[in-house]
Image: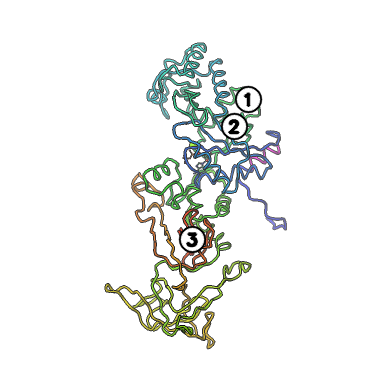
Amino acid sequence: MSTTDSPTPPSTDFVRELVRQDNSQGTFGGRVQTRFPPEPNGYLHIGHAKAICIDFGLANEFAGRCNLRLDDTNPETENEEFVSGIIADLTWLGFPPPEPILYASDYFEQIYQWAEHLIERGLAYVDDQDGETISAQRGGYGKPGIESPFRNRTPEENLDLFRRMRAGEFADGSRVLRAKIDMQDENMQLRDPVMYRIRRQHHFRTGDQWSIYPTYDWAHGQSDAIEGVTHSLCTLEFDSHRPLYDWYLEQLPLPSDKPRQTEFARLELTYTVTSKRKLAALVAQGTVDGWDDPRLPTLRGLRRRGYPAASIREFCNYIGVSRTNSRHDIELLESFVRTELNRTALRRMAVLRPIRLVISNWPTDADGNPVVELCEVVNNPENPDEGTRMVPFSGVLYLESEDFSADPPPQFFRLAPGREVRLRAAYFVKCESYTTDADGNVTEVQCTYDPETRGGNAPDGRKVKTTLHWVSAAHAIEATVALYDRLFTTKVPGDTTGDPFDELNPNSLELLSNCKVEASLADTPLGSVVQFERLGYFAHDPRTPMLFHRTVGLRDEWANIQKRSK
Ligand code: ATP
Ligand code: MG
């Protein structure tokens, strides 16, 4: 192949190829309409983000439309709180859903009428057997299905029973409506699937209007058709449902072109569960502190943790739309977060586990008080436009306790007795002595400073191995910092023991309540992210001032994983 000067083609994948093909052949009249159809029974998670980027991304790219449709066909676990949460999270992620917001429940009447249409044509029947019997009769691969004794009821009898089901005459679970397809089809989905169940359950939108509710399969394609969806994209587990999706639509007098279902791989991450049921259980058990706990892969958890929406979108674009299920390393997502924050986050100094550092030769003023100097510190070396700030420096400082060792091991280059280090943007200091408590813990380090090294450079050109961060004790303010580890101890939670909850990490949260930080951090807007120098990125909690969550560390662990796998 010869090289050309043409620009690299825009990224593509099988879904985009399909849409292009449809457009070039005039299928759907060149229209592209997708939908994002969450069930309002929980909050959105990182897996949904992939679906969102595909559904909304595709519509944007092809000048089409993507609606938010709440798939509210199962009233038991759904509510208004989740609806507004979903809208808020979509908006935060960068895809504010267009008005009007759509609901499957708005189509209940039409879908019901279509069920009568199938009954009238002899394509659906009321079955009086219980759920267990019906599923036993479904058979399995290589195991024939058994026809229900109620399969051959007349359309008249079925219509009468079905209307009485709707009217609430029968007990919950006593009857179902089933499609009459083929009890011997190789695809189990086509063995007379259930269309309606009796459930006298209050629905958060339709109230007590309905005592029967449609199944996912019976409602989904029909909702797509009512809205004029062209490309109905869903995850791979619905692959075997596609013939049923098509069968239903083929039997109905549709208002527009028949939508087409296409499946893509679910997003899974290492050390993470992305099932709403499991996430809901973690919240209900109190393992985590609500749906926005920063350890959860929910969009609101990631947001509170400090993940920029842009980094989640970038990650989703990078992994693309594949057709095979795979689990991505969580470090890859974190590297997108780090790259974005490195560009945007302001640098600040914070000491998480403080010890005192006293400069014995620090000058005092005429009143005998220690002099306070202001050091000019760069706000973001990646972005000169962010400028500098003045940070007070004086004779008593806080230092990270792990930055001092009374008895340094061979590779320890930080502060130790007799050793000189640089304090960021301030001075060289040399450790002369230290104090311990009764248990031998270091409580204070005594140093001398070299007044010639102001700004952090020695005029005689002498070097130090390390630069440490610090906070002036008299000017520091207190903060609480939450450090996080993985919520699960295994890459594939549940893989070892069969139950992900057996593989929970008991040490996923460490709360440090005694941190000493630069006073300017009080002005950091709630919800925004800064870099604590040398420590990582930290997000100011959206509600609680001076509570910071560790977003990600500074080290690019993804690069290490890649190096190892080469
Ligand atoms: P869960 O198993 O977590 O309950 P779900 O598929 O039942 O997920 P829905 O609210 O029905 O959750 O999902 C809405 C849309 O998001 C669907 O189109 C679904 O296919 C997609 N989706 C859900 N989880 C993922 C995931 N992990 N990766 C990609 N898409 C997903
Ligand atoms: Mg679902």
Query: Secondary structure under badge 2?
Result: helix
Q: Nearer the viewer, residue 210 or 474?
A: 474
Q: Nearer the viewer, mark 1 or mark 3?
A: 3
Name the residue tied to disc 1.
Answer: 254
Q: Is residue 95 magenta?
A: no
Name the residue tied to disc 2.
Answer: 224
Residue 59 in which image quadrant:
top right
Q: Can you give x and y, in whole percent of width and height, for residue 200 in the image?
A: 44, 24
Q: Which mark is residue 104?
A: none
Up/down of 450 relative to 89, above or below: below
Up/down of 6 relative to 469, above or below: above
Q: Gap in Å between the C-alphas at discs 2 and 1? A: 10 Å
Which amino acid, mark 1?
Leu
Q: Earlier in the sequence, mark 2 or mark 3?
A: 2
Q: Earlier in the sequence, mark 2 or mark 1?
A: 2
Q: Is residue 22 magenta?
A: yes
Q: Can you give x and y, in whole percent of width and height, for residue 171 in the image?
A: 40, 20
